[in-house]
Amino acid sequence: MPNLSTLLSEFITLWVVIDPIGTLPVFIGATASLSPKYARMVAARAVLIAFFILLAFILLGQIVLDALGLGLPSFQIAGGLVLFLFALTMIFGDGKPSHETAQVEKPLRDQQMQARRVAVFPLAMPSIASPGAMLAVVMLTDNDRFSITHQAMTASMMTVVLLITLMILIAAQPILRVLKETGAAIVSRVMGMILAAVAVDAVLKGFVAIGVIPEF
């Protein structure tokens, strides 16, 4: 049975790699053209999909990654590049105000299709179930080092972090409504810049890990 300090350490690790706060800019950019109802649907669906992805990595990830010979640096670089491309669309895109204006004329079916699409990418992957999160849950549930009980407790902590993520994402829409159109557009672009910086940092750390550049 793991002690309290071990569980706390693992919870902090899961919080950092899942990064509920860091998911906000992705969520804001991905749901800018959706109504509050569909934005909440995206949040719930994305967290649920991320849960099953991470659970799959807990159960099978160690076997698959060992078979493919993949490591964290490869995941970090690939995930960072994908997030950087999405950040560019937030910075240079039309922004939230024009999206909201067009939303009135946007057919209900289009919003449903977009909600299903963005819940998977980029929100569930690679934002919530990030490359780092996938590797972290594999390492924290290593079959050679941890008992079934320990692995179950780690999975429970992962679930708690994901539920907190869901609450944060649902709270984002009311905050944006308070900020009104201009404020929301500014927040979206600032979040895009933050997300771009996070993405570049992930790529650089991947290069450091494989020795391409020195540690900084």
Image (tube, rainbow, N blue to C red):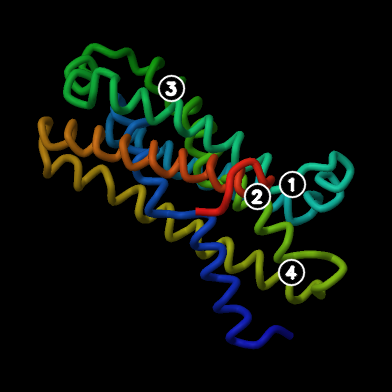
**Eyeballing the image, is 157 above or below 86?**
below
**Which dot, 4 or 1, sits closer to the camera?**
1
Q: Secondary structure at mark 2?
A: helix
Query: At which x and y percent is residue 133?
Result: 60, 52
Work out whether mark 3 precedes mark 4 in sequence or the reverse, and give the earlier one.
3
Type of the residue with mark 3: Gln
| Residue wearing tag 2 | 209
Type of the residue with mark 4: Gln
Type of the residue with mark 2: Ala
Identify the residue at horizontal 23%, vertical 12% (top origin): 105
| Residue wearing tag 3 | 114
Alpha carbon distance from label 3 to label 4: 35 Å
Query: At which x and y percent is residue 91?
Result: 29, 27
Which picture quadrant has residue 3? bottom right
Query: At which x and y percent is residue 24?
Result: 35, 45
Dots 1, 2 in contact, CB < 8 A? yes
